[in-house]
Image (cartoon, rainbow, N blue to C red):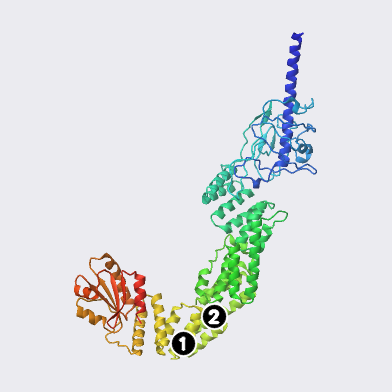
């Protein structure tokens, strides 16, 4: 009997193994189809290097959306749990063997929540149902010979050849993982074939990669992502460019290119790339959010809201807070500008920039306009942004407005005002005419255009009359220009020159004061006011202006001479002795004690440099003493070599060099040992009057 039993046991074991093998194959196919259908994330949300499939499935109406977890790709395909709804065999399409998700509704129910795949390569006869006897493997993954179509089919030209069909595949049962990506990149990995199932073991088959221009765009993108992670943004940008050249219709490549451009601070170009990605994929949520963030930074507040608050998706709370803060400050800024409250306008626009609109040339122009109205012309000029050449920003600016004015037009509008205030009348006319071409219907631009033209003509006419020595008529011409631009410092200064020529020095001083109120460091206005005050014998005011001019123009001999004569006149008015004072003196060398005492007793202040020929410090500061001699011609500069003139050194108790002493009428008033050039000049300036 034992001889009969053994053959029966052998046949039964073989039959069980065959049943189990088929059962495992069918159950693995059902589990894979279910996992793909309900557990595939949006390919744009993946971490860099993640091997999870980038494909998305279209679930059939009424299909369950249960989340499952796939196991390692090395799994044998065994499944724990039971499958109450095995997939019946279906006839594949005649050409490709593809099957839409709608044609296989049971696929999403074949793998229930809570069931997991086993990593075991052994057989578990009791863990699954045996398949019907009339179902045989077809050679594909699933006994049915079909797989679910994914939402990526229309986005990618890549095809994986499997069996007789041509369809798109994901990664299969590969765990999410891999390297972490830098935020903001689309790191979708390329698709791989699931392979054939033979006896429960996956046999991997090479998938043909799309070849366009001699490369794989997915591999190029992966290399770009690696460069981006290392902070090599220029290199990453170059690689993304290559990927786009190979596959220009891929929205993710444009999205990643935007990230590289952001790293290079080329924000306008980055915004255009996001816009391109959205054009290719209107539902690309991350592209919308990034586009909104870039628009906010660039100051396009209204358009930024549309993308940050993309319909049907939760906005980023940080970006939302920035948007609301910028909107609040810009609303207050608009109100302040309308009321002419320039100080409040400046405060609000700076707050808007700090809140998130930190790369907006329009808000920089807004700050420049406020500074100009507050008579801070130099600060306004420095705040004025450069107007970008026509390029990627042209489209972004085409519809955006600020204070009811088109963005690009506002840049020229503010520039025209500042050019006019600086006296660059031709440049002002050119800028406002450009603004008028961009936004021809804007009332503010039209009004400024009219004013600039009138002021430019008045200034040109005044200059012609001045050259013809028709000073009274020139005054009238400049005055006509001031009626249209009462804050133009150049016209005030030009009219002051006319008053000076007419001997009306009081009016000249008044116009210079107006010009300097608008532009405090206006050199020509300072010169004319100093000259007018000298004529009016207001010598202290004249000397004060010339001192300012000497600091601004330290090497100007004409200013130095004017200062010298003003100082001499001031000393005379005070009853001081001024004989033997001459302009442009040099540092005088003194060797005898009597000569020294006579020199320091001369009118005015005397600065004595005690030195030795062997001292490096003395050699270093000696050239600066020559400079001071030119800058302060009313001061007597002397030098004493204490090695050659021991009697002077002994009388003045000088032991350390370089030592500087300042005398007035023979009495020592200041002593400095090894002073810095700044300290020395400060003391000389103090005693120069």
Kind of element beneath mark 1 = helix
Is 590 placed above or below 38 here?
below
The quadrant in which the C terminus is found is bottom left
Q: CA distance from mark 2 to mark 1?
A: 17 Å
Q: Do the residues under discs 2 and 1 have CB atoms within 8 angstroms? A: no
Residue 553, percent from left and from top: 39, 75
The residue lying toward the viewer, choosing from 207 and 357, is: 357
Kind of element beneath mark 2 = loop
Q: Name the side, left or right, on which 1 lies relative to 545.
A: right
- Residue 149 visible here: no
Q: Name the side, left or right, on which 650 lies relative to 556.
A: left
The quadrant in which the N terminus is found is top right
Residue 333, percent from left and from top: 63, 71
- Please tell me which residue is depicted at 55% across the width and 66% down the height of the picture: 387
The residue lying toward the viewer, choosing from 372 and 659, is: 659
- Residue 342 visible here: yes
Residue 539, percent from left and from top: 39, 87
Q: Name the side, left or right, on which 41 lies relative to 240.
A: right
Is 22 placed above or below 321 here?
above
Provide the residue designation for mark 2.
487
Graded by Cα atoms within 10 Å as few (under 14), some (14 to 19) or many (20 or more), the crowding at tag 2 reads: many
Provide the residue designation for mark 1.
508
Q: Quadrant of residue 265?
A: bottom right
The residue lying toward the viewer, choosing from 53 and 154, is: 53
The numbered disc on residue 114 is none
> Disc 2 or 1, which lies upstream in sequence?
2
Q: Name the side, left or right, on which 219 lies relative to 288.
A: left
Residue 590, percent from left and from top: 22, 76
Q: Quadrant of residue 451?
A: bottom right
- Please tell me which residue is depicted at 48% across the width and 89% down the height of the picture: 507
Graded by Cα atoms within 10 Å as few (under 14), some (14 to 19) or many (20 or more), the crowding at tag 1 reads: many
């Amino acid at each position: 009997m034992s001889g009969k039993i053994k053959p029966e046991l052998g046949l039964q074991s073989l039959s069980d193994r065959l049943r189990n093998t088929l059962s495992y194959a069918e159950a693995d196919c059902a589990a894979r189809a279910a996992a793909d259908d309900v557990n595939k994330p949006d390919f744009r949300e993946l971490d860099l290097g993640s091997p999870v499939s980038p494909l998305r499935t279209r679930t059939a109406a009424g299909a369950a959306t249960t989340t499952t977890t796939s196991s390692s790709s090395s799994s044998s395909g065994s499944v724990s749990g039971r499958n109450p709804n095995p997939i019946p065999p279906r006839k594949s399409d005649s050409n490709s063997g593809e099957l839409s998700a709608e044609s296989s509704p049971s696929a999403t129910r074949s793998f229930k929540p809570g069931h997991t795949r086993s990593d075991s390569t052994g057989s578990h006869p009791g863990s699954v149902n045996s398949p019907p006897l009339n179902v045989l493997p077809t050679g594909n993954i699933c006994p049915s010979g079909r797989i679910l179509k994914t939402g990526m089919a229309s986005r990618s030209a890549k095809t994986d050849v499997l069996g007789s069909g041509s369809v798109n595949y994901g990664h299969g049962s590969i765990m999410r993982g891999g390297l972490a990506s830098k935020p903001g990149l689309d790191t979708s990995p390329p698709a791989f074939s699931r392979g054939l199932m033979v006896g429960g073991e996956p046999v991997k088959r090479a998938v043909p990669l799309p070849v366009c221009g001699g490369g794989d765009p997915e591999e190029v993108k992966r290399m770009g992502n690696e460069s981006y992670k290392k902070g090599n943004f220029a290199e990453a940008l170059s690689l993304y460019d290559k990927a786009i050249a190979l596959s220009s219709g891929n929205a993710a490549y444009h999205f990643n290119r935007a990230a590289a451009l952001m790293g290079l601070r080329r924000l306008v170009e980055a915004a255009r790339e996001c816009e391109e990605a959205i054009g290719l994929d209107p539902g690309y949520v991350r592209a919308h959010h990034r586009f909104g963030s870039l628009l906010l930074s660039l100051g396009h507040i209204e358009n930024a809201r549309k993308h940050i608050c993309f319909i049907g998706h939760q906005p980023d709370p940080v970006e939302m807070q920035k948007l609301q803060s910028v909107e609040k400050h810009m609303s207050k800024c608009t109100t302040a500008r309308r009321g002419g409250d320039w100080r409040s306008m400046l405060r609000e626009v700076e707050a808007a920039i700090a809140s998130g609109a930190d790369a907006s040339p329009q808000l920089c122009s807004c700050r420049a306009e406020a500074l100009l109205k507050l008579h801070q012309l130099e600060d306004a000029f420095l705040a004025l942004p450069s107007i970008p050449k026509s390029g990627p920003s042209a489209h972004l600016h085409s519809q955006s407005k600020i204070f009811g004015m088109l963005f690009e037009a506002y840049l020229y509008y503010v520039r025209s005002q500042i050019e006019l205030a600086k006296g660059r009348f031709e440049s002002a006319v050119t800028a406002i005419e450009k603004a008028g071409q961009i936004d021809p219907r804007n009332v503010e631009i039209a009004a400024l255009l009219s004013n600039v033209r009138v002021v430019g003509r008045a200034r040109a006419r005044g200059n012609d009359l001045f050259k013809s020595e028709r000073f009274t008529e020139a005054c009238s011409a400049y005055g006509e220009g001031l009626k249209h631009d009462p804050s133009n410092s150049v016209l005030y200064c030009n009219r002051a020159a006319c008053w000076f020529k007419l001997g009306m020095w009081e009016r000249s001083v008044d116009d210079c004061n107006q010009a300097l109120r608008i532009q405090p460091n206006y050199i020509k206005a300072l010169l004319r006011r100093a000259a007018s005050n000298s004529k009016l014998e207001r010598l202290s005011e004249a000397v004060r202006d010339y001192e300012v001019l000497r600091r601004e123009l330290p090497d100007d001999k004409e200013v130095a001479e004017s200062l010298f004569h003003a100082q001499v006149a001031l000393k005379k008015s005070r009853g001081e002795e001024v004989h033997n004072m001459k302009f442009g003196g040099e540092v005088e060398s003194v060797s005898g004690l009597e000569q020294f005492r006579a020199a320091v007793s001369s009118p005015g202040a005397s600065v004595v440099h005690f030195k030795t020929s062997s001292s490096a410090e003395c050699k270093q500061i000696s050239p600066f003493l020559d400079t001071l001699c030119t800058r302060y011609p009313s001061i007597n500069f002397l030098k004493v070599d204490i090695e050659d003139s021991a009697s002077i050194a002994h009388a003045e108790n000088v032991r350390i060099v370089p030592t500087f002493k300042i005398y007035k009428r023979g009495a020592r008033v200041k002593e400095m040992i090894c002073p810095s050039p700044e300290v020395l000049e400060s003391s000389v300036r103090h005693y120069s009057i």
